Amino acid sequence: MSEIKNICCIGAGYVGGPTMAVIAYKCPGINVTVVDINANRIAQWNDKNLDRLPIYEPGLKEIVKEVRGKNLHFSTKVDEAIDRSEMIFISVNTPTKTYGKGKGQAADLKYIELCARNIARVATSDKIVVEKSTLPVRTAEALKSILDHTGSGVRYDILSNPEFLAEGTAINDLLDPDRVLIGGEETPEGNKALKSLSSIYEQWVAKENIIHTNLWSSELSKLVSNAFLAQRVSSINSISALCEKTNANVEEVAKAVGFDSRIGPKFLNASVGFGGSCFQKDILNLVYIARSFGLEEVAGYWEQVILINDYQKRRFSENIISKLYNTVSGKKIMIFGWAFKKNTNDTRESAAIYVADALVDERAEITVYDPQVKAKKIYQDIDDLNTRTSEENRKYITISQNPAKDAKNAHAIAVLTEWTEFQELDWKAIFDNMLKPAFIFDGRRLLDRRKMEKIGFIYYTIGE
């Protein structure tokens, strides 16, 4: 394979868009084209108003502004971009299956297979195909089988290059990664393809931070990394419940534990639970893989991480109901934050969705404010649970554009995303507008207890 001059990325989502923007920014000699069959999404990526990009990430619009139209392009012309490129990244969605064998745990690979068949149909020259989506172990084998049996005479080398991005810091994670992982076949051709991709990253990442493995180790490493991180979150959240029963403070416990150099302080922040596109999906995938090999004890161990996360969200909702005198029917409760974490507009598996759903089940009147999530997305998220009709959801849930003003006559506020701006609100004015007693349920341990209680709030938080 000759030097890479043209890259195609299939999938213009949370991974494909930012990753390709940074590659284009750091590699001006490479022409990068991001393609997607979703014309509306491509139109948003091409919008002159950079505030309308489909993804919100700090630093993203500045990089897009710098390289879009130069060596970064967004297009719906999938076939053209595939044929022109020497390297193709597959960055499409791999949701958890909702049907058939593996329902609720296994990854649905239909979009991956469609990509492979499309590449096979279009390609007229040799290609390096890079798995960027999070995939089950040995997916590369399936990809290669499809591509190698086309009879077209085109050679395909498959690489695994999983992403390790944290939403909200994705651009920094791309510009200054802890590591870049590349897995390839242990053959002369596979090593050559691996070096081609490695040479791209080496234009801004130190060689010692680029890890080379075989294909299967790379694919499994991604699942295991997310499983370990989620495990830490569920571990501290399980302890938060114990802290509330014993008058211990989970923050003090986490600090003491985190000082142990063997453990460290990261991912020990107790909260209402983790969300996002990766943690739950990847753990469920790991559980399915373990179970498919008859490793029931391994599957059960990792499944418990998910069960604790679900328990934490359920516990938070039940605490709101309990503290509001065992009924929230007809009571106005404001939800501050719908995104699963700050500095992103991604709402996948956000705790706010499940807390709101539980409260609406009890006939609470919910008002939602999030600085980056649109009303359409909020309603779509709650509708997708299929708990009730869209009309019922709209009866009980309204959207706020002004949280301080819309707190009028609210009984309680639930903080479910750690947006910095929530710390800067005029909480005295909010308190004055609310019905008394005025409650705050801080699911992110974001606010200052002493300040809130001095104002007059009855304040509850996780782990105290």
Image: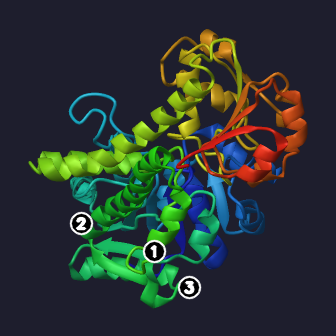
Residue 230, picture quadrant: bottom left
**Residue at mark 3:** 203
Q: Which label number is shown at residue 216?
A: 2
**Element assignment for label 2:** helix
**Marked residue nearer the N-terminal end (3 or 1):** 3
Q: Which residue lies furthest to the front in this view?
A: 246
Above or below — where is 440 with respect to 301? above
Q: Which percent across, then down, holds residue 114?
A: 37, 43
Front one among 142 and 443:
443
Front one among 286 and 192:
286
Q: Residue furthest left?
A: 294
Question: How dense is the environment of label 2, judged by Cα within 10 Å: few (below 14), some, or many (20 and up)?
Answer: some
Mark 2 vs mark 3, CA separation in Å = 26 Å
Residue 209, picture quadrant: bottom left
Q: Which percent across, then down, holds residue 137?
A: 25, 57
Front one among 72 and 418:
418
Residue type at mark 2 is Trp
Residue type at mark 3 is Gln
- Please name the residue shown 14% across and 46% down the image: 292
* Left or right: residue 65 compared with residue 95: right
- Please name the residue shown 45% across and 44% down the image: 245
Q: Which percent across, then down, holds residue 182?
A: 37, 74
**Element assignment for label 1:** loop
Residue type at mark 1 is Gly
Does any portion of residue 148 appear in the rendered image?
no
**Element assignment for label 3:** loop
Mark 3 vs mark 1, CA separation in Å = 31 Å
Front one among 25 and 398:
398
Mark 2 against mark 1, which lies toward the viewer? 1
**Residue at mark 1:** 264
**Marked residue nearer the N-terminal end (2 or 1):** 2
